[in-house]
Image (cartoon, rainbow, N blue to C red):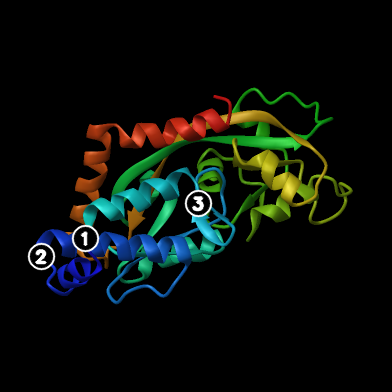
Amino acid sequence: MQNSIRAAAQRPGAAMRKRWVSLVAAIVLLTGGVAPAGALTLVTEDNPPYNFTADGKPAGLSTEVVMEMAKRAGVPIDIKTMNWDDAYRAGQADKDTCVYSTARLENRENLFNWVAELAINKWAVFGKQDFDKPIKVLADLRKLKIGGIVLDAKVEYLKSNAVTNIREVVRDEENPPRLFLKPDDPKYIDLWVTSYYAGTDIAAKAKAAPVKVVYVLREQPLWLACSPRTDKDVVKKLVAARASMEKDGSHKRIVQVYEKKAGR
């Protein structure tokens, strides 16, 4: 039997070659090994439950979707986690590079090749447990100091709605502790805009006191978006792969796993 397997490996047919491509992509993703030549680079940030690093490996709802897309498309990929502003810039400018999970906004439409919707996020504003100012509409945020991160879609959305008193940092973990500073501290913020599902975990990771949601901004689809310098044939393969996941229900099954974890 071992001789038969060895002989088959030495004479790979088209089907076997396809399986090997998928296997290489999976190995790169799961082991963090060196990417094969010609691999598509995917850049992301730590933003659970959509994309984050667990035990040194890429994880999360969106990560599982892009991994399955790459496998079906036969496209080897290399996932790199970094600060969001670096990921966003790389996904916009670098050759054969894509960024996820990102919001598809009007002012971003021509900056990327928009490949596929991966998940649905909620954008929320968090505050301290004793925050008691009524926030019923976006305009109520305009007189407050809001913490956010550089080049984040939620920050862009607030600015487009005349909420401009935003104090941006590079890493979201920097924001929760700023809620508990003295009001006269230049780093102090009244509220913090982030993902509805990630806020509590980010605050805990930052060792800040418990926080609460004071206002939900909107629900927002999250996308895989590629640099205009990405091979068009690769983009087409990924688009087709995502369509096949919708057709056979595999995307829905991945989403349901995470919804169950979140108690939804």
If you read the primary sequence from the N terminus, does the residue marked by circle 3 or circle 1 appear first? 3
| Disc 3 to disc 2, C-alpha distance | 32 Å
Q: Which residue is mark 1?
A: 234
Q: Is residue 80 above or below residue 143?
A: below
Q: Is residue 11 above or below residue 70?
A: below
Q: Is residue 157 above or below residue 27?
A: above
Q: Secondary structure at mark 3?
A: strand
Q: Which mark is residue 13?
A: 2
Quarter of the C terminus within the rendering:
top right
Quadrant in which residue 233 is drawn = bottom left
Q: Is residue 1 visible?
A: yes
The residue at the point 68 percent across, 47 percent down is: 202
Which class describes the residues within 10 Å of circle 2: few (<14), some (14-19), or many (20+)? few
Q: Which residue is mark 3?
A: 59
Quarter of the N terminus within the rendering:
bottom left
Q: Nearer the viewer, residue 43 or 76?
A: 76
Q: Amino acid at mark 2?
A: Gly
Q: Position of residue 72 (x, y in %)?
A: 24, 51
